[in-house]
Image (spheres, rainbow, N blue to C red):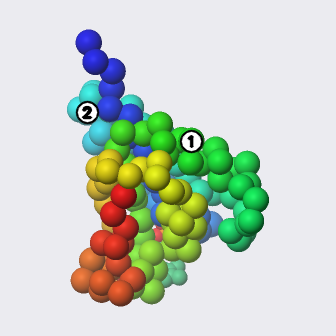
Amino acid sequence: MRGKIRTALIYGSTREGRFCDRVAGWVASEIAVRNAFSVDFVDPDTLGLPSRHERELAPAVARLRERIGKADAYIVVTPEYNHGYPAALKFVIDSVRDEWRAKPVGFVSYGGLSGGLARWSNSGSSLRSFTP
Ligand SMILES: Cc1cc2nc3c(=O)[nH]c(=O)nc-3n(C[C@H](O)[C@H](O)[C@H](O)COP(=O)(O)O)c2cc1C
């Protein structure tokens, strides 16, 4: 029998008291129903990433790239911040190179008034430009 599809569930928020944990938990429970997927929880809050992009490859960035590279598919769970997405998620996206090229990605977004929808209609800051 073939192995499970390795999914990386990427958290968008590192905010103290974040709601992201609840949404990510729900997404994980939906994935678990299928039984065809394994999930690696990629939480920028626990990755120990540097606060800026550095000339030398930081060990935490190397570990992140390795985890992303091992996944077959991605689900990004993110809130909407100022009609965009949080800086922590941007840093994760910008830290990865070819590791996720040509692999599928899905998005689960949420927010306040707009419910996370504005980001999809605002191409200027949209995750639509993020196409691994
Ligand atoms: C800095 C900041 C900016 C926000 N900007 C928006 C926004 O533009 N549109 C929206 O619908 N909600 C906005 N919200 C509300 C958040 O999307 C909402 O509270 C969400 O649950 C936060 O997720 P988190 O707790 O996982 O960080 C913003 C919240 C914060 C903290």
Instruction: Estimate the x, y position of residue 58 in percent, counting from the top left.
Output: 73, 54
Q: Is residue 40 above or below residue 23?
A: above
Closer-to-camera residue (63/113): 63
Closer-to-camera residue (40/23): 40
Image check: 45 left or right of 69? right
- To which residue does mark 2 refer? 33
Quarter, ligand 1: bottom left
The answer to whether the residue bearing label 1 lies less than 8 angstroms from the nearest atom of ligand 1 is no
Q: Is residue 22 above or below residue 54?
A: above
Picture residue at 62% right of the left edge, 66% below the top? 16
State the count of labels: 2
Q: CA distance from mark 1 to mark 2?
A: 27 Å
Say which amino acid is labelled 2.
Val
Quarter of the view holding residue 105: bottom left
Closer-to-camera residue (37/92): 92
Secondary element at image label 1: helix
Instruction: Estimate the x, y position of residue 106 in percent, counting from the top left.
Output: 29, 55
Picture residue at 32% right of the left edge, 48% below the top? 103
Say which amino acid is labelled 1.
Glu
Question: Does residue 111 show up?
Answer: no
Picture residue at 30% right of the left edge, 39% below the top? 31
